[in-house]
């Protein structure tokens, strides 16, 4: 594809995305009232005080499907792995958006079945981890599948876990995608760059109607969809840029991964079901601390800004040491230490 044609395509696609999102946001309550409208103000992760339509996932799926069709017409390549994985996980989350109650254990089991099917059908693999003993285990096909499955589970559930504040997940997605886009542009990987830039356009269109004041929510379908896109983008970028250290991706995905990991350990320690939501996640503690300040009128918006700004600052070493596995390994463990310090400080403040 020629650069000039690409530019025209992105302009047209951007305008189409904005128009489609505007129309769906404007008429969402008329079409989806009683089905996709969030009126639950008492759940731990609820911070809105008026009914909001959870159609963000539907908007993003529609626009991404449109892009996949355009991409096929232009390049002749059908992005079947992207399309099938995101579509399947979208529908799993969409059941909850439709208020169809599914036991968390059953939902997790369905997610496992979907992911195992997709990993096998599309031969999704991760060949290197940056750790010698783990690389040896990755040569085993069963362990390879198990490892890829864990990566999907951590990131997708991490995306679903942090979703709840206006712009928190979508801005985080944009930052991750922008880092991958920059890396692929530097290494002249045009196809994945086009895919990433189109995803950025789609999520930016959604963000305009979700931040700072939300007119629509992502819903579980949207968080699952964005989480699956992040994993696929990560694996594709890893395949196309073999010189990158695996710890480059560990640092990029740190927040989503560690939020789930720490939450799981914390709940097990407290003898709480890891599948049960609570109000003790980092973003919720930060929100509670900001809410106590009389000078801060919009802690919801500010929480998303603070967390993503801190995340962006943590990614600065990537631009200097993206090929240096040793330094990035130290950065990863430093991030764990910083996370723990901040978490327990906020937790102690929440008790006062």
Image (tube, rainbow, N blue to C red):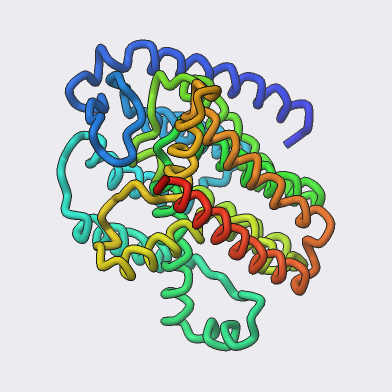
In this view, the residue in front, 187 or 254, is 254
For image coordinates 78% across by 56% down, the residue present is 317
Compared across the picture, whether 336 is left or right of 279 comes to right
Residue 243 sits in which quadrant? Answer: bottom right
How far across and how far down the image is residue 260, in percent? Answer: 43, 59
Q: Taking 124 as reference, is 185 left or right? A: right
- Pick whichever, 195 or 250, lies toward us: 250
Position of 122 relative to 228 (above/below): below
Near-viewer residue (11 or 291):
291
Task: Please indicate, yes or no, whether residue 37 appears anywhere in the rendered image.
Answer: yes
Is residue 178 positioned above or below 14 on the image? below
Q: Quadrant of the N terminus?
A: top right
| Quadrant, the C terminus | top left
At x 62% / y 59%, what residue is drawn?
A: 338
Residue 274: image location, x then y, percent: 30, 62
Give how far across and how far down residue 101 sits, in percent: 15, 44
User: Number of numbered discs present?
Assistant: 0
With 234 as the anchor, is 62 left or right in this view? Answer: left
Tell me if residue 198 comes above or below residue 317 in the rendering: above
In the image, farthest residue toward the right: 320
Q: Residue at x 68, y 42 (%)?
A: 178
Q: Is residue 17 visible?
A: no
Q: Residue furthest front?
A: 352
Query: Can you give x and y, in whole percent of width and height, for residue 12 in the image?
Result: 62, 19
């Amino acid at each position: 594809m020629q650069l000039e044609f690409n530019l025209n395509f992105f302009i047209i696609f951007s305008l189409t995305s904005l128009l489609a999102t505007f129309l769906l946001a404007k008429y969402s309550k008329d079409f989806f009232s009683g089905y996709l409208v969030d009126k639950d103000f008492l759940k731990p992760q609820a911070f809105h005080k008026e009914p909001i339509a959870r159609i963000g996932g539907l908007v993003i799926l529609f626009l991404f499907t449109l892009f996949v069709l355009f991409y096929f017409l232009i390049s002749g390549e059908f992005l079947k792995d992207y399309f099938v994985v995101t579509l399947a996980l979208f529908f799993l989350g969409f059941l909850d958006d439709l208020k169809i109650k599914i036991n968390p254990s059953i939902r997790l089991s369905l997610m496992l079945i979907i992911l195992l099917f997709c990993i096998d059908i599309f031969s999704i693999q991760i060949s290197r981890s940056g750790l010698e003993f783990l690389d040896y285990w990755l040569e085993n096909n069963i362990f390879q599948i198990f490892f890829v499955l864990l990566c999907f589970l951590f990131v997708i559930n991490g995306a679903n876990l942090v979703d709840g504040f206006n712009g928190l997940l979508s801005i985080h997605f944009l930052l991750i995608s922008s880092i991958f886009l920059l890396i692929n542009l530097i290494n002249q990987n045009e196809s994945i760059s086009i895919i990433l830039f189109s995803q950025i356009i789609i999520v930016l269109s959604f963000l305009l109607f979700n931040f700072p004041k939300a007119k629509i929510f992502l819903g579980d379908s949207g968080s699952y969809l964005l989480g699956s896109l992040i994993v696929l983008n990560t694996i594709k970028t890893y395949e196309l840029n073999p010189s990158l250290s695996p710890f480059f991706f560990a640092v990029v995905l740190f927040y989503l991964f560690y939020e789930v990991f720490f939450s799981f350990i914390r709940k097990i320690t407290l003898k709480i079901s890891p599948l049960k939501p609570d109000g003790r996640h980092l973003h919720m503690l930060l929100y509670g601390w900001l809410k106590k300040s009389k000078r801060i009128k919009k802690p919801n918006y500010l929480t998303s800004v603070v967390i993503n700004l801190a995340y962006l600052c943590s990614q600065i070493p990537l631009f200097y040491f993206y090929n240096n596995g040793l330094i990035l390994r130290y950065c990863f463990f430093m991030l764990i230490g910083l996370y723990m310090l901040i978490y327990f400080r906020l937790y102690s403040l929440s008790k006062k």
